[in-house]
Image (spheres, rainbow, N blue to C red):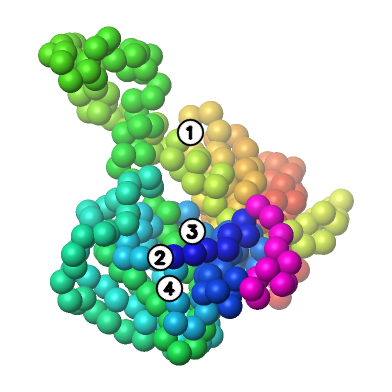
Amino acid sequence: MRFLHGETGFFSKESILEGLKEGVTIELIGTQKRCQKIKRVCAELERVLGHRVGAEVFLTPENAQGFSAHYDYVDVFILQLEGKKLWKIWDIYKPFPLEGMANIYSTEKPDPIYEVVLNPGDFLYLPRGYVHEACTLDEYSLHLSVGAIVYTWVDLIQEMVKDEPMLRRALPIGLLQSEKKEKIDASSLEMVKGVLQDPEKIAAAVQNLQYRFQDERLDSNAQGFETVCIQKELSNDAFFKKREGMSCSLVVSDEEAKLHVGEDVVCCPAHTASTLQYIMDAEKFSIGMLPNTLTESGKMALMRSLIRAGLIVANVS
C-alpha cells in the first residue's frame, strides 16, 4: 500500500510517472479547492445535505491497490472517471465512526456482500462505517471521491458544554490511573445533566453549529464584476432575483439578522428579517414589492449590500 501525496508540495512529472510504474496510488487531496467544476458539485451537495463536503481524486495504475480493507468516517460518493476499478464491500459495520477512530480492518473477513467493477460514468455510494477495499485489474483507474463530513450529536453536545467553566476543570488527580478508585463527584454529573436539558443551551449550540457550518462551507459562485459596479441610484421598479445556485441561510436573534452568503455574512438589524426572508423566497422581485418594514432609503441600502455580497443580480426580464 503506497501513496504519492501531493497536498503540500509539488512533484516532478518524472517522479509521478516513476511512482505509477512502481504501483503507487496518487492521491490529490482537497480538489474542491483546485477545480471549479468539482467545487460546484461539492457546494451543491453542501446546500442539500447541510454538512461539509470535500473531494479527492485517486489515480491507481493497473494491478494495484491503494488502501487495504478499511472503513471511512465520512459518507463517500464515488464517481469513476477513467479506467476500471473493482470494489468489495463487507457486511462489517462500525456504527457512525468519528474522525481519528482506527479504520484499518485487518482481521479475517467473510465473503463480501457486494462486489462490483466500476466503469467510466458509474457511481457508487459508501455509507460511513462499512468496511470496503478497491483495486485495479488490467488497466489503470481514475476516480473522484466526494466525502460528506457530517456534524454529529457529539459536536452538538461539545458546543453545549464547552462554555461551562466548571466542566472545563481538570479531572480529579489519579482518576485515570488504574489503581485509583476515585469517582467523579455527583455534583459534576448533575451539572452535565442540567446543561444537556437546558432548552436555551440547546438552541445556542445549534446556532453556533450553524455559524460554524456557514464559515466552513464552500461558495460555488465567484463574485461577478457587476457586484462591485453598483449604480448610485437603483430603480424602484427594476426586477431582481437571487443568483442561481447561490447558497444562503438566515439566522435571526433579538439583536440582528445575519444572512450567510457563501463565505460572507451580511449583518442587518433584526427588523429586516422579514424582508430578507422575502428576498430569499421570491422567484423575482422589485424594490417596490419588498415588505414595508423598511423605509425606501433602507430598502435601497439593503439591496446594495446584497448585490455586493453576490446574492442577487439586477436587470431581470
6 w.r.t. 60: above or below: above
Viewer-proximal residue among 2 and 244: 2
Check disc 2 and report the residue beneath it.
Answer: 67
Gap between marks 2 and 4 measured at Cα: 6 Å
Check disc 1 and report the residue beneath it.
Answer: 253
Is disc 4 in contact with disc 1, using a CB cutoff of under 8 Å? no
Circle 3 crowding by C-alpha within 10 Å: few under 14, some 14–19, many from 20: many
In the rendered structure, does residue 11 fall within the stretch colored magenta? yes
Specify start and end residues of the magenta stretch as a single range.
Answer: 8-18
In the rendered structure, does residue 55 fall within the stretch colored magenta? no
Q: Which residue is drawn at the image coordinates 38% and 24% (left, top)?
A: 162
| First along the sequence among labels 1 and 3 | 3
Check disc 3 and report the residue beneath it.
Answer: 53
Is disc 4 in contact with disc 3, using a CB cutoff of under 8 Å? no
Say whether residue 126 is visible. Answer: no
Q: Nearer the viewer, mark 4 or mark 1?
A: 4
Viewer-proximal residue among 136 and 193: 136
- Type of amino acid at the residue the image marks with label 4: Gln
Check disc 4 and report the residue beneath it.
Answer: 65
Q: Position of residue 22 (x, y in %)?
A: 55, 74
Is disc 2 in contact with disc 4, using a CB cutoff of under 8 Å? yes
Gap between marks 2 and 3 measured at Cα: 21 Å
- Element type at mark 4: loop
Circle 4 crowding by C-alpha within 10 Å: few under 14, some 14–19, many from 20: many
24 w.r.t. 307: above or below: below
Q: Which residue is drawn at the image coordinates 58% and 78% (left, top)?
A: 21
| First along the sequence among labels 4 and 3 | 3
- Element type at mark 2: loop
Q: Position of residue 183 (x, y in %)?
A: 15, 14
Q: Position of residue 252 (x, y in %)?
A: 49, 38
